[in-house]
Structure formats: C-alpha cells, structure tokens
Amino acid sequence: MNTKDTQNFKEKLLAEKTELEGELASIGQKNPSAKNGWEAATQDMEVDKADENAVADKLEEYEGNSNIVSKLDDQLTEVNDALERITAGTYGICEKCGQPIEKERLEANSSARTSIKHAHK
Ligand SMILES: [Zn+2]
C-alpha cells in the first residue's frame, strides 16, 4: 500500500474514531474500570423507586444502552488498533497470511485485520 492510500485510510479511521466517541459520549460515560473504558450512562437513572414500572423501564433502557456501548466500544478498539498498525507500518497486512489486504476490503472496513480469504474463522 502506498503512502497516499495509507493516509486516506488514516483519515477515514480518525473520522470513524471521532464518530464512535461521539456516539459513546451520548449514551455512555467513561469509566476507567470498565472493560474497555466505557459503560452505559447512569445519570438519567433517577426514577421514583416506588414506581416499579418506571424502574423496570429504566433498567431495560440501561441494558439496551449497555449492549450498544459495548458494541461501539469494540468498534472503537478495532479502529484504535488499526491506527496503531498505521503507526507501526503494519497496516493493511493480513494477520493470518502476511499478504496485503485487498483494497476494496479496507474500503468496506478500514479496520480489517485480515484478507478476504481469511476474513472468516
Ligand atoms: Zn490472509
């Protein structure tokens, strides 16, 4: 991969990172002791404890947010890892076979770790 391509993917990854962090910040909060540093926000959890339905709704919402946060967080980890590979000069190399990853695959998923052939375990 040439320098210009790498630069393009780097910009794409940085944009994805900003977007993911924005989404995470809207429904989650940073917590250094959480698995990847993010957890679902709890500041809106103040409900009338006597109202069981409200409590159940909030818990459901919190669980839903937790799932989304953990998904976004995983994506963010992938993006950060890809940015590290750019810095290390190993970006766009398949982790399974050491061959360059197809450009169209990287365009579909700029944090791909493997070639099309090795995409599925
Ligand atoms: Zn491969």
Image (spheres, rainbow, N blue to C red):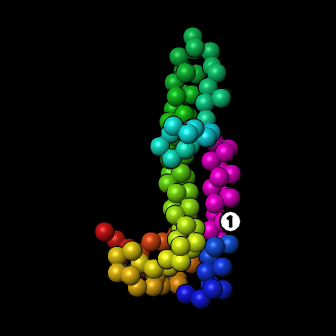
The span picked out in magenta is 12-27
Q: Does 44 appear above or below 70?
A: above
On the image, the x and y values in percent for residue 106 come to 53, 77
Query: SS at mark 1?
Result: helix
On the image, the x and y values in percent for residue 62 come to 54, 34
The one of 44 and 89 positioned closer to us in this rendering: 89
**Label 1 crowding class (10 Å Cα cut-off): few <14, some 14-19, many 20+?**
few
What residue appears at the point 45 percent right and 80 percent down from the top-left corner? Answer: 93
Q: Is residue 64 something that shows in the picture? A: no
The one of 96 and 23 positioned closer to us in this rendering: 96
The one of 80 and 70 positioned closer to us in this rendering: 80
Q: Name the image quarter holding residue 57.
A: top right
In the image, residue 13 lies in the stretch drawn in magenta = yes
Residue with the mark numbered 1: 15
On the image, the x and y values in percent for residue 60 come to 51, 32
What residue appears at the point 57 percent right and 73 percent down from the top-left corner? Answer: 86
Q: Does 2 appear above or below 52?
A: below
Q: Name, please, the residue furthest toward the front.
A: 88
> Mark 1 is on which residue type?
Ala
Q: Name, please, the residue furthest toward the bottom.
A: 2
What residue appears at the point 55 percent right and 44 percent down from the top-left corner? Answer: 37
94 sits left or right of 12 in the view: left
On the image, the x and y values in percent for residue 111 come to 52, 69
Q: Does 14 appear above or below 108?
A: above
115 sits left or right of 107 in the view: left
Q: Quadrant of the C terminus?
A: bottom left
